[in-house]
Amino acid sequence: MSLHPTLQPYADAWTHSVEAISELVQPLVESEWNRRTPCPGWSVRDVVSHVIGLDCEMLGDPRPIHTLPRDLFHVTNEHQRYMEMQVDVRRHHTAPEMTSELEYTIIRRNRQLRNESRDPGTKVRGPLGTEQTLEEAMRYRAFDVWVHEQDLRTALGVPGNLDSPGAHIARDELLAMLPEVVAKDAGAPPGSAIVLDVHGAVEFLRTVRVDAEGRGSIDGAPSLGPAVSLMLDWETYVRLACGRVTADAVADHIKAEGDTDLTAALLQSFAVTN
């Protein structure tokens, strides 16, 4: 048996992004590993440590036994504490140690994926002791690794892969969370519609509709009288939705029409990742 067809796109996207990360960091000198990335509180080394650590968890490796320092001000909740453990334990690793562990982890994960014969619905270990399906875990790894590839590209000044396989998985992941952002977090009123028009490397138009009970749903049909229309480029959308920038910082990349209060609430609630 081999990898289930449902899982293949996630494996392909993960491979594409993680190999891009490896190519990006291979030539870096020691000081470049300390560059700040758009991911709050994390350097280039920290982002790569996170990628290594979560793929080690996908391999079933035990989590490190490690006490976090008290002065990590970007760590404010249990989810962030969980993610920080794999990062902080590698904070003093040298460039050769980082690149060699990344390469070894990629080799191990590729071997695991070649031999993966489990059903997509198989339950696997998730963060903070949760359970998730194998499909959910692989989809989120593809999304996560692509986002962190973009973090590294921004930090190192090497743009690219905004339309790679991982980008399309990221689009679907972010759009799946948008109805809750609109209906619950931003408080769009029942019966209203919000149109999102994204252009650039990945282009799409989506409408989030809030029903009479206040529940949000999303589709690709335009709305004739939306409460708010947002037009922005793909890179800005990703950076906003992943909490890498504030709406104020990229205001010149966003065109908004409609209810100004609702627009402000939407942009305030736009980030969906920790």
Image (cartoon, rainbow, N blue to C red):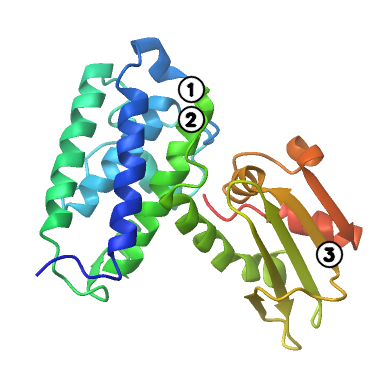
Q: Which mark is residue 153?
A: 2
| Nearer to the camera, 251 or 11 | 11
Question: In what element is the residue under mark 2?
Answer: helix
Mark 2 crowdedness (10 Å alpha carbons): few <14, some 14-19, many ≥20: many
Mark 1 crowdedness (10 Å alpha carbons): few <14, some 14-19, many ≥20: some
* 232 horizontally vs 60: left or right: right
- In which quadrant of the rendered image does the N terminus lie? bottom left
C-alpha separation, residue under disc 3 versus residue under disc 2: 32 Å
| Nearer to the camera, 162 or 257 | 162
Q: Residue 64: horizontal and vertical position, in percent?
A: 21, 41
Residue position marked by numbered label 1 in the rendering? 156
Residue position marked by numbered label 3 in the rendering? 228
Question: In what element is the residue under mark 3?
Answer: strand
Q: Residue at x 51, y 63 (%)?
A: 172
* 184 horizontally vs 252: left or right: left
Mark 3 crowdedness (10 Å alpha carbons): few <14, some 14-19, many ≥20: many
Q: Is residue 37 above or below residue 216?
A: above
Q: Amino acid at mark 2?
A: Arg
| Nearer to the camera, 65 or 18 | 18
Q: Is residue 2 visible?
A: yes
C-alpha separation, residue under disc 1 versus residue under disc 3: 36 Å
Q: Is residue 9 above or below residue 65?
A: below
Q: Are marks 1 and 2 in contact (CB under 8 Å)?
A: yes
Q: Residue at x 28, y 66 (%)?
A: 7
Q: Amino acid at mark 3?
A: Val
Q: Residue at x 13, y 66 (%)?
A: 2
Give the image quarter of residue 210.
bottom right
Q: Amino acid at mark 1?
A: Leu
